[in-house]
Image (cartoon, grey):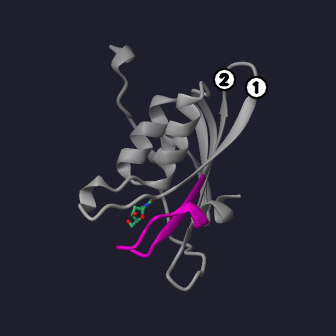
Amino acid sequence: MAEEATEGAYAPYSKFYVGAVVVASNGKEERIFTGANVENASYGLTVCAERVAVFKAVTEGYRMIKEVYIVAKDERGNVVEKVAPCGACRQVIYEFSDGAVIHTPSGSYTIEELLPAGFRLDEG
Ligand code: THU
């Protein structure tokens, strides 16, 4: 599914097409949300695939992230082995998870492994 999600990417600048799948719970049931990176001519406004998928889940009421799957493809359509969520996406995932597992082509990690000592306002 994450590979299929790369097809939604708008990446005319980097030509790096990322797809993300988020498995999230609303406390009653789990649902799947997909996302892809959306770039902008003003480069810094680009939003990563992970954040698009997380924001879709959260705005639908699914605020407990269980798993995130990430796939990236290059200009030729080949799957890129080396992809991991950027720091901003790690912090965004952290906000909505407790032990979420992030699956990349090269391995799986908990969000706490990827973002030790992440920031939460409610932890004094
Ligand atoms: N990108 C993602 O969507 N997710 C990642 O995990 C890494 C980077 C995007 C941002 C930009 O559109 C392109 O990949 C190149 O950095």
Q: Nearer the viewer, residue 105 or 112?
A: 105
State the CA–CA distance, disc 1 to disc 2. 6 Å
Q: Nearer the viewer, residue 25 or 87?
A: 25
- Does 5 lie within the magenta span? no
Q: Total of numbered circles in the picture?
A: 2
Q: Which of the numbered marks, if any, corresponds to residue 29?
A: 1
What residue would you read off at disc 2? Answer: 26
Q: Is residue 2 above or below residue 102?
A: below
Residue 87 is at least partly visible in this image:
yes
Q: Which of the numbered marks, if any, corresponds to residue 62?
A: none
Place of residue 98 in the rendered image (x, y in percent of width and height, measured from the top left): 56, 29
Place of residue 28 in the rendered image (x, y in percent of width and height, measured from the top left): 75, 19
Kindly identify the amino acid type of the residue bearing the numbered disc 1: Glu
Q: Which residues are magenta?
A: 7-20
Q: Is 39 left or right of 109, judged from the image as shown?
A: left
Q: Are marks 1 and 2 in contact (CB under 8 Å)?
A: yes
Mark 2 Cα-neighbour bin, 10 Å: few <14, some 14–19, many ≥20: some
| Quadrant of the image containing the N terminus | bottom right
Which type of secondary structure does the marked residue at label 1 adopt?
Answer: loop
Kindly identify the amino acid type of the residue bearing the numbered disc 2: Asn
Residue drawn at (43%, 76%) of the image: 15
Residue drawn at (36%, 46%) of the image: 88
